[in-house]
Amino acid sequence: MSAKTLFEKVWEQHQVVPESADTPAVLYIDLHLVHEVTSPQAFSVLRSQNLKVRRPERVLATMDHSTPTDPDEVFGRVPIKVESAARQVKEFEKNCKEFGIELMGLGSEYRGIVHVIGPELGATQPGKTIVCGDSHTATHGAFGALAFGIGTTEVGHVLATQCLLQRRPKTLAIEVTGKLRPGVTAKDLILAIIGEIGVSGGTGYVIEYRGSAIEALSMEERMTVCNMSIEAGARAGMIAPDETTFAYLRGRRFAPQGKAWDEAVARWRELKTDPGAKFDRVVTIDADKLEPMISYGTHPGMVVPITGTVPDIANDPVHAKALNYMGLQGGEAMVGKPIQVVFIGSCTNGRLSDLELAAGVLKGHKVAGGVRMLVVPGSQQVKREAERLGLDKIFTEAGAEWRESGCSMCIGMNGDTAGRGQYAVSTSNRNFEGRQGAGARTLLASPATAAAAAIAGKIADPRAFLPH
């Protein structure tokens, strides 16, 4: 038997029909995550074709993208202000009820960002194939799952058949050696990786993150890394499951219990790349050399160390256009640049450990005058636990806004936006033009860097604010 990579093992276990020169493979899907934005058209197609959802018990639904984070809107004390969001919420409730799908609705204690609640409920498990009409589905690969985003038409295909047509990607190993230094986070690591390989460096590949620095990460940190695989152009990102994975999943709502748990763990232990298995490409990153990172442009590959300067690149119209939009110049230092908005949240950095990191920096400080800081937990469970630990008090006493869970300012389609020309230090995953509001200028960073900027009122090195 030939040695296989983690990806190859999961792919082959789910391949119903192999691909040919003329046709993609048919891949079985274990878990389908759906939300209110990319599903309405798919349900309409099912209805028009008189089709049912093939396996409703393998579908998990939540509201996150367009839902408000204002408590009064969430709990119905006032109407949802964004009309399109109100329509999507109502339509999604109707569709899930009609097709027999469990929905974490606006009032559910389990509701949250789809890529946060899947793991925290234990629905995300090693070896599964997981899809969602959202590009950051790669998050779930942190558990050794093959997880990727799909389009609206494909959402309909999976609802109707529980299968998907897919061409087999190539394999890319990113070996991260050494150890992250104090003040350098998983978000800094993935930004550095994207900066190294570029936003198309992973195109056509599934990435497996490997090495001592990856093995040392917590599950939440691993999710941050895998989450942004799509920003490097990759189809998915994966990390082999280990004792850290099993400890995280044990006892969660949808995780196996009793004897089934022991049997599952025995299977999951086999989900690692065999010695001698070959990758199509290998990239090595030295974690010891990394610093806190921040973006300066209009895609996630435009990043520099926090102490660095904006690259001065001649005869590059794409680079010039990005700097013009961002109001920056080549050679300009990033530290000291005034900012107006700080956003902590999203499926990249809206988990409990992210909030703890930000609160650790912010504790005992105040948000600078003229700066709006929005803190949005990734789920209602994260919100409750943060409040139990008193993190909400740290944020509000510093002058930040503490909200209900949702995608919030990451995507700017739910009422949470930055203003035109404002600089927003954001823990989200995309800094495209207009992503966080028309004309808004997004600077991607870690929760620690975002909190430091909120205190300083300008881009600041988070290492100066970390507890000693």
Image: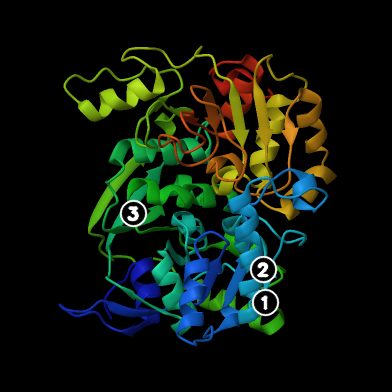
Residue situated in front as seen by the camera: 145 or 68: 68
Seen in the image, is 280 located left or right of residue 213? Answer: left
Q: Which x, y percent locates residue 85?
A: 61, 53
Question: What whole-number distance in Å separates the C-alpha atoms at marks 2 and 3?
Answer: 33 Å
Residue matched to label 2: 93
Seen in the image, is 353 located left or right of residue 169? Answer: right
- Earlier in the chain: of badge 2 and badge 3, it is 2
Query: Of discs 3 and 1, which sits in the foreground?
Result: 1
Instruction: Label 2, secondary structure: give it.
Output: helix
Residue matched to label 1: 97
The amino acid sitting under disc 2 is Glu
Q: Which x, y percent locates residue 209?
A: 40, 53
From this view, report whether residue 189 is shown above or below residue 273.
above
Q: Which x, y percent locates residue 142?
A: 50, 58
Query: Of discs 2 and 3, which sits in the foreground?
Result: 2
The amino acid sitting under disc 1 is Lys
Question: What whole-number distance in Å separates the C-alpha atoms at marks 3 and 1?
Answer: 35 Å
The amino acid sitting under disc 3 is Ala
Residue matched to label 3: 234
Q: Is residue 137 visible?
A: yes
Q: Which x, y percent locates residue 315?
A: 16, 22
Task: Tell me the tag on residue 207.
Answer: none
Packing grade of label 3 (10 A; few <14, some 14-19, many >=20) is many
Which residue is at a point 29% across and 46% down the rendered structure image? Answer: 283
